[in-house]
Amino acid sequence: MGGVIRFFLVLLAVLVCAAPLLAQDTPKPTDEDLLARIERLEAELANLRSRVEDREREALDTELRKKTLVQLYGDIGLRYHMLFESQTETFNRPEFRLHVGVFGTAYDEDELRLRYDTRFTTSVLDMMGRPAPTLSWLPFPGYGSRVGVSFDRFLIDLDISRTFQATAGRFPTPFTGTEILFDRDYHFQGLSESVRFDRFLPDAMQRVIPRIQVLGVQGYLAQNNLGLPTPTAEVQPIYVGGQFRLDLAPFEQPVLTPEGTIAPEVNSEVEFRLVAGLHWFDGEEGIASNLGTGYLDQTTNVLGSDGLVQSGFLVGEAYGEIIILRTRRARVKAWFHGLYNFQAKPQFEGTSERNDQAFDAGVSWGMEQFENRWDFLFAFHYFYIEADATIPEFNSEVRNTNIKGWELSLAVRVFPTITAFGEFTITERENYELNGFGRASNQDPNRAAGQSLRMRIGFYLEF
């Protein structure tokens, strides 16, 4: 027993003597290491806190949407609109716009969501007294005169698992692209269907391929009591079209959250968007004679000797877009949108020239959606639209067709609900033998010198 005690005493003495040596072999953490560790822990804690707050906010928003059947929205806009053609003042006037609508979620359970939306706006007639479905800005009325309003949107929207979506009624254009094909104020009347195939991919692939979508729209315009084309046995004013869209984030690197799931934030600074579409119209004769083109007295399409639109419309489109600084609120975006009408006919018999092509190319910098004060969006683009590339009653009201030129625009959110904007456009006719913007001076022997200068400055309040 005494030997065992002596053994433990010797071992204890050896350990006591060796302790300083062992302490010297173990490196002490420096102040820099401690600061780096603390900063890393603080960053992880802030990231976790942000995720928790976002999830709580989303859960609260979802719960409020489920409980709120009616939500009011809209905007009131005022602007000054100046148009000069060949240095001659065409008009120089103040204008206003009003949108008021209600929307809500009627059902949202078990991956099934059913929503509705209805809206009325200021109703615009062109100089020939025909409705212009792409316009909502009106000149200030005279004292005591009435202002026309009409419903431009009423729809029911069904969404299943964020994968399949169907819309019925009168709805804004769901297509990706610029306004050379469909103005953003234009509303289809009929059906729309959309399928998102990227939902079937693994979570990691969904970060690299954010969207694979097929979209289709079927529209019918034969409501003659609203001023739209009257159907006849020869002319049925209908539209059928669709798009295939592919989004790619080539530098995406999925990361895991502390819970072990893939983080929802996109971290790729670059994203590509590719779209291919095909659009078929019928009944363009009725459309041209019943719908207004906006600020022009007649269609800008090529007309035959009978005064009817010369061409049919089977329009193929290609749209490409690159987004840089994808994770920032102020993004840089460049795009190209091209159209080709396969059914366009020659302007004159015996010639091969057809007015069948259009494109829009541009770049922008800023926020896609204004949420905070001083959010902004600056854009520049050049466009070239031949007369029969598309139907002018559907595309931008200040471009129509048979036009080429460039435009600068700037919008800034100056107050939480008020946005100021300005647009500066210089254009001329692509073909001076056809109708369009830009009048050549009678004293100018060079007809191509006729240009149009358009300036629009104003603001709108959203609620």
Image (cartoon, grey):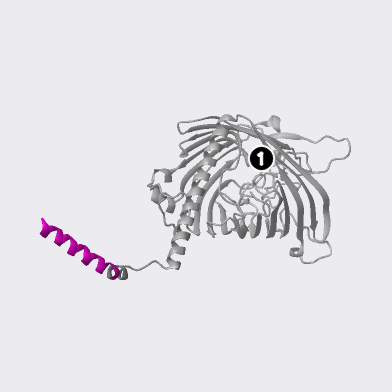
Tell me if 26 is positioned left or right of 117 in this view: left
> Of the residues shown, which amino acid type is indicated by label 1?
Ile
Near mark 1 (Cα within 10 A), the count class, few <14, some 14-19 or many ≥20, is many
Residue 275 horizontal/vertical position (percent): 51, 51
Q: Is residue 167 left or right of residue 381?
A: left
Q: What stretch is highlighted in magenta?
A: 1-20
Residue at 45% across, 37% down:
161
| Residue under the point 69% across and 54% down | 411
> What secondary structure is the magenta-colored segment mainly?
helix
Q: State the image coordinates of residue 47 (x, y, percent, origin top left).
A: 49, 52
Residue that label 1 marks: 287
Instruction: Residue 263: tell me if it is visible.
Output: yes
The quarter of the image holding the N terminus is: bottom left
Q: Is mark 1 on a helix, strand or loop?
A: helix
Can residue 118 be seen here?
no
Q: How many labels does the image show?
A: 1
Going by the image, does 157 lie left or right of 195?
right
Which residue extends farthest right?
Answer: 143
Q: Which of the image's four quarters has the C terminus?
A: top right
Q: Nearer the viewer, residue 188 or 376?
A: 376
**Residue appearing at x 56%, y 57% in the figure:** 328
